[in-house]
Image: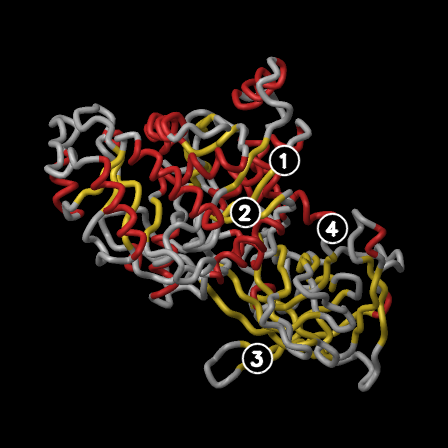
Amino acid sequence: MEDKNFIRRIIEEDLKNNKHERPITRFPPEPNGLLHLGHARAIIMNYVLAKDYGGKFYLRFDDTNPITEDTLFIEGIKRDVAWLGCEWDELRYASNYFERMYELAMHLVRQGKAYVDDLSAEQIREYRGDLKTPGKESPYRERSIEENIDLFRRMRAGEFADGEKVLRAKIDMASPNMNLRDPVIYRIQHTPHHNTGEAWCIYPMYDFAHPLEDAIEGITHSLCSLEFENHRPIYNWFVEHTEVENQPRQIEFGKLKIADQVIGKRNIRKLVEAGIVDGWDDPRLITLSGLRRRGVPPAAIHDFIRALGLPKSEGETELSMLDEYIRDHLKTSARRIHAVLDPIKVVITNYPEGQSETLSAAYNRENEALGSRELTFSDTLYIEREDFLEEKPNKKWKRLSLGLEVRLMHAYFIKAERVEYDDEGRVETIYATYDPRTKSGSGFKERKPNGTIHYVDARTARPAEFRLYQDLMLDTDEQRPITERVDADSKQVRHGFIESGVDIQERERFQFVRHGYFVADDDSEKNRPVFNRTVALKSSFKPKK
């Protein structure tokens, strides 16, 4: 998006020719679920293209189906868009235009361009034909204008049951574009609406409502994904035949698809309702709320979207590309601290019993503004279980083993002397010695350690929960139900410790040395923080063969 793209060229040409004084764009979600990463392209694109040319950006809820919509989703979507930093100039609701849209539909009826149909939904599908067979006209298509006016008024008055009648546009049942074969533009639904209550029992269909919402709001460039390209003729038909003053232009772009990820509100809803994921904000999902809970910086999403550009065609993108932008942002902004996720105890036998000392360490050497903290050190520590093997396996092993010496980061050299086992035969405690001459910063150079590992002081360490997330989906076989393709081990919970003395802010992001980037979760308690892993330190992406 930093470079010229085809939509930028269209906007610039329109402004040059004085077709518009400024662009007005909108992001029009239906509040029947929360947004995902695929929506980020549309949100950011509409926002940036409006602001770059001195225009306006609206957030409009396309709330024309009260059966599937919920105010919880409205509030969630508002949080998501605001979190991305795409501040809307005006907040709009399609339901605010119900009266105006009814008047425009009645205008079509009076012009003989819409009629009330008694066919059932199944019969309408049957009459519509297919790509090889022209549609068949409804027996109610030639009702008089007077009768259609009367019936449409009575539909609004609530005289008919759900599905008993619909209002259809009268266009062309033989059109090669299926969307032009007398589309339904109003249906009966005796369902209360979140905004209008029980004022309406008829609701406009998307293809009718959407272009009129754009026209009413003065939208200049109505940007949508390629799946709506064959809807453009019906979009233009309604704009033209309702004779609205503003003439918005629909422009399509390629949808953002993320390989091997669950995208689509329908599939996400299935996982949520089945209890397979922990809600719409589960960090394994690429919903915007899930990405936020996983600690993804919104600026990284903006960089990701800009790098992909705004193509006319569609293509898949690996999520690992976003991970690289996340690392770029966090490597200098996150405080680096010690955390032990799978602890094993180390007792230093020659350290003075009952003694403790503090060691100074910077939070992030690449960003001195983050300051420093004091690490405590005593005779009892925790290290990662994976950092110890009783016998050194090979020359490449650069951690702790019996008889080997390693440096504890920011502290001393220690040597493992012997171990004790628990009832299950696992190493429970390592007994080690330390060399007081090797304190970090002392300049000791007599010998080199077998690597450097991190630790936390067992006497001051804070208990913490760590949630590690892997890819949610085992395979992409769409023939199988999505609920059967989920990896049951995609969420792993570990209980360990972090260093003491670190004040943890709400949703603060950290780098845990050698483990990756983590964020404090909302489930955290004062004495027991919970962290979600945002991304590992290095990419584990492997190209498909």
Mark 1 vs mark 4: give the one in front. Answer: 1
Q: Which residue is mark 1?
A: 56
Relative placement, left or right, of 371 versus 91 is: right
Res 532 label: none
Res 92 label: 2
Q: Marks 1/3: CA distance?
A: 63 Å
Q: Marks 1/2: CA distance?
A: 13 Å
- Asked whether residue 430 is in view, the answer is no
Mark 3 vs mark 4: give the one in front. Answer: 4
Sort mark 4 into few (<14), some (14-19) or many (20+) by Cα contacts within 10 Å: some
Could you tell which of marks 2 and 3 lies nearer the N-terminus? 2
- Asked whether residue 344 is in view, the answer is yes
Res 428 label: 3
Could you tell which of marks 3 and 4 lies nearer the N-terminus? 4
Nearer to me, 148 or 353: 148
Helix, strand or loop at disc 4? helix
